[in-house]
Structure formats: C-alpha cells, structure tokens
Amino acid sequence: MSMNQAALARKNLEKRLAPLRHAPIAMPSRGWTRAIREALGMTTRQLANRMGVSPSRIPVIEKAEATGATTFKTLREAAEAMNCTLVYAFVPTKPLDDILHDQAARKAGMELSRLDHTMRLENQAMVKGDLADERQRMIDDLLSGALRGLWDDE
C-alpha cells in the first residue's frame, strides 16, 4: 500500500471510529448474553434450543463471556439466536495520526538521546534549539517513510 493510500485508509477508518471513541459502551457485569437473554424474557432452555446446544451449556457460555474466556464464534451464535448482531471493533483511544505521531516522537527521542549522549562524550553536544529541530526532523522522516519500521523495537 502506498503512503497516500495508507493515509487515506487511516482517514476513512478514523471517520468511522471517532464516534465510538466518545460513546463508551461498557459490557454489563454479567455479560451481554445474559443481559439480552433476560431482557427478552428468554430462559436458558429457550436460548439453548435456539442455539442447538444443551441447556446446561448456556450458563457456561454466559460465565465464559463475563470472564473473557469465550470465543467470537460462540458469541456470534448466541447473538444470532437472540436476533442480535455481534459487533466487534478496536477503538483507538485517540486519533490514529496522533498515535503514529506519538510513536514517532518516542522513537526519535530514543535515537536522539543516544546520539546526544555520544556527542557529549566527544564534547560536541548540540544546543537545545538544535536538538528540538533535529527531533522534529526525525519525527517527520519517520512519518514520511514506511510506517512498519516505526514499530520496531531497537
């Protein structure tokens, strides 16, 4: 994917995700399966029949969901049995471009710190203004290149 295509994809994804960032949806303490089942007035036996599983399986499914030990397949099957749609998304805590900029700043800061240390040992330390300019140049370079390298640990 080219740089322009990646930036356009980020922009489009950001438009879709931004509203979710500000509308936090917290899972009910006992899980969505149980909350929806009870709201519909459906018994565990009725849900089990609709899912094609034994009635003893429903409390296991509900407990596994509440503890985070379930699968998407099971959740999707339970949702469909209750005429619901399972919705799945990663919602970034802030805009994607901000996440990229923060990572580039961290990486540039680490590299600049090593460079500055070496230059100080050689009595060639950079002044603060030059350090800030170099840091910004490094950030810009990182963001203008292939973003895959941005996430490598060094």
Image (spheres, helix red, strand yellow):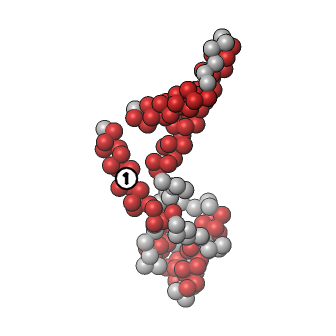
Q: Residue furthest top?
A: 122
- Tell me where residue 56 sits by quadrant: bottom right
Q: Label 1: few (<14), some or many (≥20) within 10 Å?
A: some
Q: Residue furthest bottom?
A: 41
Q: Does the rendering let one see residue 153? A: no
Q: Does the rendering let one see residue 6? A: yes
> Mark 1: which secondary structure?
helix
For the N terminus, the image quarter is top left
Percent of width and height locating residue 41: 55, 88
Q: Residue at x 55, y 68 (%)?
A: 24
Percent of width and height locating residue 151: 51, 36
Q: Residue at x 59, y 70 (%)?
A: 26
Quick one: 66 or 129, which is closer to the camera?
A: 129
Q: Residue at x 60, y 66 (%)?
A: 65
Quick one: 17 or 35, which is closer to the camera?
A: 17
- Tell me where residue 93 sits by quadrant: bottom right
Circle count? 1
* Amino acid type, label 1: Lys
For the C terminus, the image quarter is top right
Relative to residue 117, is residue 25 depicted above or below?
below
Relative to residue 110, is residue 14 depicted above or below?
below
Q: In the figure, is residue 81 to the left or right of 126?
A: left
**According to the image, label 1 marks what residue?**
11
Quick one: 140 or 26, which is closer to the camera?
A: 140
Q: Residue at x 62, y 74 (%)?
A: 28
Percent of width and height locating residue 18: 45, 62
